[in-house]
Each structure stands twice: as structure tokens, then as C-alpha cells.
Amino acid sequence: MSTLTLAAWATLVFCAPGYPGGAGDGQPYVDQFAKVAATTAGWKPDSLGAAYEPSDQGGLAKLSDKDSVLAFMPYAFYVEHAVALHLAPLAQVDVAGVGTQEHWTLVGKAGGPVTGPSSMTGYTILSVAGYAPEFVKHSALAAWAPLPADVKIEATGQILSALRRVASGEPVVALLDQTQAAALPTLPFAAQLKTLTQSALLPVALITVVDARLPDARAKAFQAALVKLNSTNGGAEMLASLKLKGFVLPQLPGNAGLP
Amino acid sequence: MPPIRPAAPLSSMTVEQLAAAVAADARRIDLETDSKVRDQLAADAMQNAQACLERAPQAAACLYYDGVALGLNARAHPLQASSVLKSMLEALSSAEAADPSYDQAGPARVKALVLIKAPAWPLGPGDPETGLAAARRAVALRPAYPPNVLALAEALAKTGDAHGAQDAYRHARDLIQALPPSRDRDDWQHQADQELSKLSASH
């Protein structure tokens, strides 16, 4: 993409698979984010647009568009698609109430038969990150790798239903993000659940350059803008509307994004 | 635009008048495009609902419209929506316990809609499975009232039963077409047609 075209229009795609809200719900907030971030980077305010994609497939489709130069994504999405989409991390997201890193927790039925990876035969893992099986197997459940070959991984946005299925003794387990795991004690059937294993700390979300579509100088300027965004005038308030606190330089686990 | 507050002072209004005033606020909010006016209508609905509860704290009408008013305020102030929606669900549960048939099984119907549309656990009180159960209760009580069947269809779709949802929307459409012309009839018909198209397109 030429610099001339970039100056006219470029898009930051917010990929949010598994999280609540339709495309219209998040759009005003991501529009504002793009405008403030572009201005902070010294770009023309209207040189960067934003698109909110609530599904994995929608995000992938949007990222195939040559105007999609930047992407905001959960770490699971990054692990799943980093190689194919040539994603280069610019910044790691600091999410309000979570931080820049989080643990993922595998939950099974208390007193149930699952005690380790070998007893997972015939089981299904339900998770908001189920769209990213590579992330589930090799990042979130790295400590239990390899899982039995017949273990299925399914995406679900209905994690409460998934936990009810776990508690009822169905052959399913639930892989929870940090927010979900922290809320487990609030469930009336919490006593019927138990933590099976927990991941190491993993990044929560990233902003990346897509397929080298952003010239290096511009990428550096945007990265610097992201890191100082929460200290700019109105920046913290704008970030809070997206439940974000700010950005730090990326610190990825050693195997992230490798084939 | 007509004034938001009725001419009569709250203290002179009956329970029925106060409940009707909240219902009127809710209808006007749906048609209003100015966000400031919507905020005023939501605040007015809360005042009317509170006055109703002060008059008759156990009346199904007051409990139900307290729930409706809280819902209007959740829409007007989305950052506080999660806690307000929890209060709304409590009010609707109390209304359902007092009189499950009120407003054509309104407490269970509205509860169903909140549970299937609200952000799900742990971010909010959304719980589609419990919403489906509430929608089934509404339909069991008032099976010929189209909004109950539309709520059931929406709950079925949200919980993954696309065929059940299509059947329910078709049934709702049959019920709607048997009604005399009205604005409500047109709105319900539009909703049923639109959702059936979406479900047909995705399957």
C-alpha cells in the first residue's frame, strides 16, 4: 500500500470474537479510539477508520481487506492467526480490571473423573476462546499438552450454560478467562465445580500491524502514540469507554505466533 | 412535543394512572430520537414508578412498572446498566409472584427479554436458558398474546434452537394476522417477518 493511499484511509480492525455485542454496539467507541490514536500519532484525524467485528470469521474477512493495516485482538486470536496473517505486535493492551496479562483456568466437575490430560478422552472443552484451538491446546493448556486426540474444542459465548453442563456431569469442561474464573464463587452451583489447571500468565490482547501494510516509520509513531495514549488530554476517559487503561510494549511468551 | 409530566400532581394519581404513565413514557421513549428527551422520559418513568410503589408497594402493577422504569433507565445510562438490570429483574420477579398474569403475563415476558438480551455472566445478568424458561411461562399463561410468542421465539434462537425459533415466529405471525389493524400489530408483524428472514438466511 502506498503512503498516499494510507494518508487517505486506513482501518484498525477490532476483532472481538466471543465477547458480547454486535458490530453496531461497539462501533462508536472504536471510531473515537481510532480518531484519538491517529491524532496522538501525528496523523490526520480522519486518516484512520475503525471497524468492530464481533466474530472470528468476520474479523478474518475484514483483515483480508488491504486497507486493514492494524488490528486489535484477543491474544487467542493472535496465536491462532499470527502466522497466516503476518501479524506483528505493536502494543499489549492493559484491560481495566484485568491488566496486561491473565491466567486461563480449566474448570471441571467437582469430584468428577477428569484429573489430568489423559482422563480428558471423549471430553469437549467449551470456551469463549474455542474459535482458537491452537491457543487452547498450546497456550492456555500448555501444561496439559498433548491432549488426547479425541478431545473436541468448541467456541461458546454462553459460558454460564457451559458451566451448568460441567456441573451436571456432562463430558465437558470449561476454559475460563480471568474475569470469568474470578466470578466463579458468585455462582449458586460453584461448589459443584473445581479448578483442574491454570495457564501461565498470558497477554490479554494486542494491537498488531497486519501483513506489513503499515510502513515502519508510521508503525513506530503509532506504537509511541498507543503507549502514551492514557496520559493525553481525554485519553484516559476515551480508553475507559472501551474498558481499557492503556498500552505497554509487547512482551510475548517465547512460542507466541510460531507455527 | 407534549409535556413529559402530566398535568396532575403525582400525589393525586391512582395506582392505575401511575402505571399507565410509566407505560406511556416507555412508548414515547421508543419513538423519541432526542437523547435528552429520552433521559427525561426515563427519569419521569422512575418518578411515576416510585410514587406507585409508595402508594401500593405489593401491587403487581407497581412492581411491574418499577421493573419497566428501571429498564428504561438502564438504556439511558448504559454504564450503570448491569446493576440496574439486576434490580429490574428483582422487581419483575416480585411482580410475577404478585400476579403472573398482569399485562398479559408481562412480568415473565419482560424478564425473558432482559435475560436473553442483557450481557451474560459474569459481565451482566444475561442468562438465555433462564430467559427461555421465563418465556415458556409467559406463553403458558397467555398463549394467544403475540409478544409472548415472539419472546419465546427470540429465546429459542438465542439458545441455539433455530428450528424451534422459526416455528415460534411462524406461529406468532399467524396470531398477529388474526388481529384487527393497529400500530402494535404492524410492529409485531414487522418483527416476526424480519427475524424469520434472518433465520432463513442463516440456515
Image: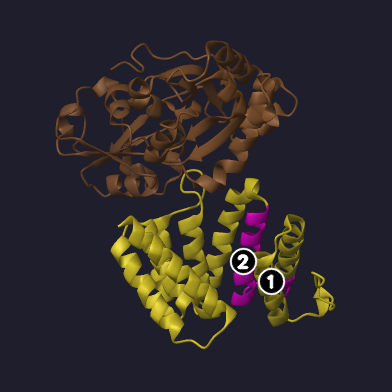
Of residues B124 and B170, the one drawn nearer to the viewer in this rendering: B170
Find residue A72 and report its horizontal and vertical position in percent.
50, 28
Q: Would residue B73 be visible to someone looking at this image?
A: yes
For the residues labelled 1 and 2, say whether their Cβ atoms are less than 8 Å apart. yes
Q: Is residue A119 left or right of residue A6?
A: left
B69 within the magenta span:
yes
Q: Is residue A236 above or below residue A180?
A: above
Q: Is residue B20 above or below residue A36?
A: below
B128 within the magenta span:
no
The stretch in magenta equals B51-76
Of residues B143 and A40, the one drawn nearer to the viewer in this rendering: A40
Residue that mark 2 sits on:
B68
Q: Is residue A226 left or right of residue B97?
A: right
Q: Is residue A96 left or right of residue A120?
A: right
Find residue B135 and report its horizontal and vertical position in percent.
42, 68
- Identify the chain drawn in brown: A
Q: Label 2's element?
A: helix
Residue that mark 1 sits on:
B22
